[in-house]
């Protein structure tokens, strides 16, 4: 099958690529754009380690084809830092000890960011509901929840 | 008077977390090297079959394929952790022993080409009768999986202390039960991956591992390449939990492919491959017989534990022993008999697990509560009565130098008003607890110790060089924190070179709970050596005594005249001028009995020290659905002294999930040698919504040997959280569990049975 041309915006940069019709967004991000922050941990949408934000919605990039994101605005973990400053969620994850092996961290932070984009003051159960879409094998989630709460309390 | 500490004991952000929150941390699958090839592996569809022929001719002709290998391309070496367990060729030539076993592999210019080639390899098999149940495999006449292992018994550990039979005769009350547990999936979020690059006779490797030196040694044997030509490099690791302690078939395969092509080769496993063809956890059957005196003193114990060992030996002798040891390190055992059998079956390769042996440990602890009830005692009393204390010896002769068992029991139980709740358990609502100890390091011969060196740059910043490996638990940050304390410079001034076999010296790795007690002890000593050298020069400059020298916030001064400060960089430069740069060296070798052997001599000092922990769970059981809801979970752990309390808490919280909540959710399901739930949809790992209200307690006992009093940082909860669930289930229902996990089907079945 022939590659097809597609354009979209990633972390405020417009890109135009020729991709295979069956290529997932995760493959495009990791292999073509070298944005390896999004991870493949399950390949079938159950773990959330590949979460990126597409048009303000958290998306499992292993489940959508790159051809579906024509003209979309995509945010990945690599784009969170602004002018050399960490995003409050990145800071809170560090300060609250919410990071262990780190493999789920980019997806977890993107899921949390999309929650805060929609609702800047979520309560604890809303936070739990949102991050329950992402699996973490190390932390038991307590410090992740606390990190997100910490950002909400400061905003 | 206790010395004031500046960094140790503080809740500091981990040094590695900045790379992880920005997505910059590079894991093995993220590595891209010029001209890199992609590898794929052909796997066995049979649980047990003779390999008659492998035809790779078509695969080799696919354009873009650069190499295709089978077992014949290897060197005929079988790997085993011990001389007597060498049975694993990594790419078999005679027969396959489990579904998913590696048969052949190829390296090609991209993944699709590699996949195409793999599908063109033709293997002729002659299926053999398989055996899946270890108890069946032990029967006479069962199919033999390896030659030279009658009844498929891979390892038999026999420990006998005191006069067990006599003690049972004299016991006031005797109870015997049988418990089972399905093996769990490690389910580390990072699927296994390996990159190898063979160039100019040297092999560089990156893979998630828990001990770079043991990995290099295994590959040196398997590939017949001298150790100095194999360089396992540092890489970020997405979890291990015991599953990445040993060499993997993938390491061997990717190395061979790179040697053949002299190009970098990368293999990334899918989640399903990770579950089926990387390490798995042992399924366990435990028969537990306990005899007690009227006052609750346990006088006799007889244990028979059968471990489903899968197709190869792996860490066999250790796996067949550890559940017993972590229990004997916790309780007094005057008369005890332990038979541990690790049995070959036609299932995947197994390894140690941070929660290893839950049938045995949860079985022992839940049975203990039943016994306490029979005697009119409660779980706290019976544990305090039988628990070991500092100064005592374990049944197999390990001396305990610090012990916070009592404190962990008291602290954890008082948070939930345990005594009253246990006595007045309302229908289907209960509390329960589990205790355990953990050795800070296993005997591993000359690999039991660790060393470290530290050097200074001319600006006063330092680099520590240690083999400590970080699988996610925070070992790198912990080493830097300790170095910062000793050297008197902030953590951000310290670089670390670690987990690289070329740059570092031997270390036990991160799978025997040795990183803090052994590895960080070496870091501390190396930094103390460097500090002494700094103090020597500073003493001249400040005209004071060495004992009065203080180094703090990059400045050196005398305690008696703190106004007169010299920057540490001046001292470092002075040392360069004198031709004696500041280079500190330190090593630590724990007090262990090197004559101890897992099978032939299971007696003597096991480890330098032991940590202690208590888990407490509160749950309700829904009698209509069989669903258990865990409401509250307390974990109390004696880690000697926490280097970074936040990191230790994180270990406990993870343990509550991975062992505690797992006890109602997680288990591998098998059918005819096929793993039925290899992905993360069918295998349920807890989400944030499954987690109870959690509290952690860090008990400080100031271990006399550990660095700044520290011991192992949290494994006791991974090895006791399921016990708390099992005990609470007993309290709620009056029934002992029969098999873990306590999923609704098993709960409903148990509720149909008689109490007791």
Image (cartoon, rainbow, N blue to C red):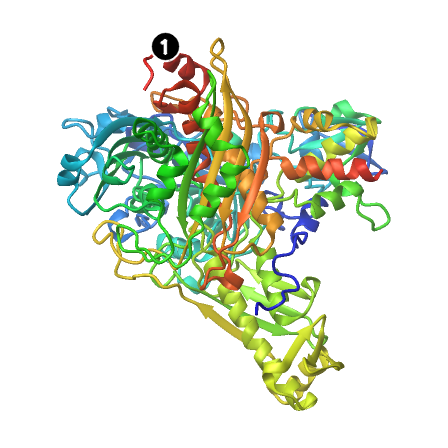
The picture quadrant where one finds residue B110 is: top right
Q: Position of residue B426 (x, y in %)?
A: 47, 18
Q: Chain of mark 1?
A: B
The mark total stands at: 1
Specify whether B58 is left or right of B15.
left
Let me know if residue B447 appears in the view.
yes
Using a 10 Å C-alpha cutoff, classify the residue at mark 1 as few (fewer than 14 neighbours), some (14 to 19) or many (20 or more).
few
Specify whether A107 is left or right of B437.
right
> Quick check: B614 above or below A44?
below
Q: Residue at image x 24%, y 52%?
A: B602
Q: Front-most of B63 and B428? A: B428
Q: Secondary structure at mark 1?
A: loop
Specify whether B457 is left or right of B642.
right
The picture quadrant where one finds residue A16 is: top right
Work out which quarter of the rendered image holds the C terminus of chain B and state it: top left
Q: Residue at image x 60%, y 54%?
A: B644
Let me know if residue B238 appears in the view.
no
Q: Position of residue B396 (x, y in %)?
A: 26, 52
> Quick check: B482 above or below A130?
below
Q: Position of residue A5 (x, y in %)?
A: 79, 28
> Quick check: B187 above or below B533?
above
Work out which quarter of the rendered image holds the N terminus of chain B and state it: bottom right
Specify whether B57 is left or right of B155.
right
Q: Which residue is mark 1?
A: B752
> Quick check: B524 above or below B476?
below
Q: Position of residue B158 (x, y in %)?
A: 20, 44
């Amino acid at each position: 099958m022939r590659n097809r041309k597609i354009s979209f915006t990633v972390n405020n940069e417009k890109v135009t690529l020729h991709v295979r019709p069956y290529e997932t967004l995760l493959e495009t991000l990791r292999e073509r754009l070298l944005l390896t922050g999004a991870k493949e941990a399950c390949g079938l949408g159950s773990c959330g380690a590949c979460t990126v934000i597409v048009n303000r919605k958290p998306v499992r990039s292993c489940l959508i084809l790159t051809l579906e994101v024509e003209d979309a605005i995509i945010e990945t973990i690599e784009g969170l830092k602004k002018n050399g400053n960490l995003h409050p969620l990145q800071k809170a994850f560090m300060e609250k000890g919410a990071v262990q092996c780190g493999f789920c961290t980019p997806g977890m932070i993107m899921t949390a960011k999309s929650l805060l984009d929609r609702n800047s003051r979520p309560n604890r159960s809303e936070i739990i509901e949102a991050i329950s879409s992402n699996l973490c094998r190390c932390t038991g989630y307590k410090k992740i929840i606390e990190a997100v709460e910490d950002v909400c309390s400061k905003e | 008077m206790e010395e004031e500490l500046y960094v140790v004991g503080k809740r500091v952000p981990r040094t590695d977390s900045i790379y992880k929150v920005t997505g910059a941390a590079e894991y093995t699958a993220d590595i891209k090297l010029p001209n890199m090839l992609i590898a794929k592996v052909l796997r066995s569809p049979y649980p047990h079959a003779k390999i008659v022929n492998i035809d790779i001719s078509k695969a080799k002709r696919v354009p873009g394929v650069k190499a295709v290998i089978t077992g014949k391309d290897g060197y005929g070496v079988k790997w085993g952790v011990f001389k007597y367990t060498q049975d694993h060729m990594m790419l078999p030539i005679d027969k396959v022993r489990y579904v998913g076993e590696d048969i052949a592999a190829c390296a090609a210019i991209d993944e699709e080409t590699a996949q195409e080639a793999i599908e063109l390899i033709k293997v002729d098999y002659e299926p053999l009768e398989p055996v899946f149940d270890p108890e069946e495999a032990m029967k006479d006449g069962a199919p033999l999986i390896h030659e030279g292992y009658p009844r498929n018994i891979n390892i038999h550990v026999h420990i006998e202390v005191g006069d067990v039979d006599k003690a049972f005769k004299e016991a006031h009350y005797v109870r015997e039960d049988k418990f089972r547990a399905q093996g769990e999936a490690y389910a580390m979020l990072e699927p296994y991956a390996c990159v190898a690059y063979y160039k100019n006779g040297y092999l560089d490797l990156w893979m998630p591992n828990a001990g770079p030196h043991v990995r290099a040694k295994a590959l040196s044997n398997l590939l017949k390449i001298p150790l100095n030509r194999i360089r396992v490099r540092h890489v970020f690791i997405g979890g291990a939990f015991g599953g990445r302690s040993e060499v993997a078939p993938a390491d061997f395969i990717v190395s061979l492919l790179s040697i053949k092509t002299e190009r970098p080769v990368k293999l990334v496993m899918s989640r399903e491959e990770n579950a089926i063809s990387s390490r798995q956890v042992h399924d366990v059957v435990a028969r537990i017989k306990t005899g007690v005196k009227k006052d609750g003193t346990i006088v006799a114990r007889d244990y028979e534990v059968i471990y489903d060992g899968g197709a190869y030996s792996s860490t066999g002798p250790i796996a067949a022993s550890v559940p017993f040891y972590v229990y004997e390190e916790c309780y007094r055992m005057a008369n005890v008999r332990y038979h541990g059998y690790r049995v070959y079956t036609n299932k995947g390769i197994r390894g140690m697990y941070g929660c290893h042996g839950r049938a045995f440990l949860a079985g022992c602890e839940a049975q203990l509560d039943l016994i306490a009830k029979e005697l009119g005692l409660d779980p706290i009393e019976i544990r305090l009565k039988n628990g070991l204390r500092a100064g005592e010896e374990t049944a197999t002769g390990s001396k305990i130098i610090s012990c916070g068992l009592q404190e962990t029991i008291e602290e954890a139980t008082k948070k939930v008003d345990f005594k009253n709740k246990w006595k007045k358990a309302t229908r289907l609502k209960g509390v329960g607890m589990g205790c355990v100890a953990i050795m800070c390091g296993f005997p591993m011969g000359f690999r039991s110790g660790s060393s470290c060196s530290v050097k200074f740059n001319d600006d006063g910043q330092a680099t520590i060089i240690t083999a400590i490996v970080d699988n996610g638990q925070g070992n790198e940050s912990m080493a830097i924190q300790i170095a910062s304390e000793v050297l008197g410079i902030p953590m951000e001034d310290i670089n670390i070179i670690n987990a690289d076999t070329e740059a570092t010296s031997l270390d036990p790795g991160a799978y025997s709970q040795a990183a803090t007690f052994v590895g960080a002890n070496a870091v501390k000593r190396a930094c103390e050596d460097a500090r002494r050298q700094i103090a020597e020069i500073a003493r001249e400059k400040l005209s004071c005594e060495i004992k009065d020298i203080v180094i703090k916030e990059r400045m050196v001064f005398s305690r008696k005249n703190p106004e007169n400060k010299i920057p540490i960089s001046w001292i470092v430069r002075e040392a360069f001028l004198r031709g004696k740069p500041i280079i500190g060296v330190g090593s630590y070798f724990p007090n262990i009995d090197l004559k101890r052997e897992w099978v032939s001599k299971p007696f003597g000092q096991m480890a330098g020290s032991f940590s202690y922990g208590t888990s407490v769970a509160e749950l309700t059981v829904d009698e209509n659905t069989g669903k258990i809801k865990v409401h509250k979970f307390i974990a109390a752990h004696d880690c000697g002294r926490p280097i970074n309390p936040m990191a230790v808490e994180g270990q406990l919280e993870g343990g509550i999930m991975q062992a505690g909540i797992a006890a109602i959710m997680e288990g591998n399901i098998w059918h005819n040698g096929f793993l039925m739930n290899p992905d993360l949809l069918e295998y349920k790992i807890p989400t944030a919504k499954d987690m109870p209200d959690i509290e952690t307690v860090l008990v400080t006992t100031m271990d006399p040997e550990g660095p700044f009093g520290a011991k192992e940082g949290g494994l006791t909860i991974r090895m006791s959280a399921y016990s708390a669930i099992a005990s609470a289930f007993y309290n709620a229902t009056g029934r002992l569990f029969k098999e873990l996990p306590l999923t609704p089907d098993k709960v409903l079945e148990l509720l149909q049975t008689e109490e007791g």
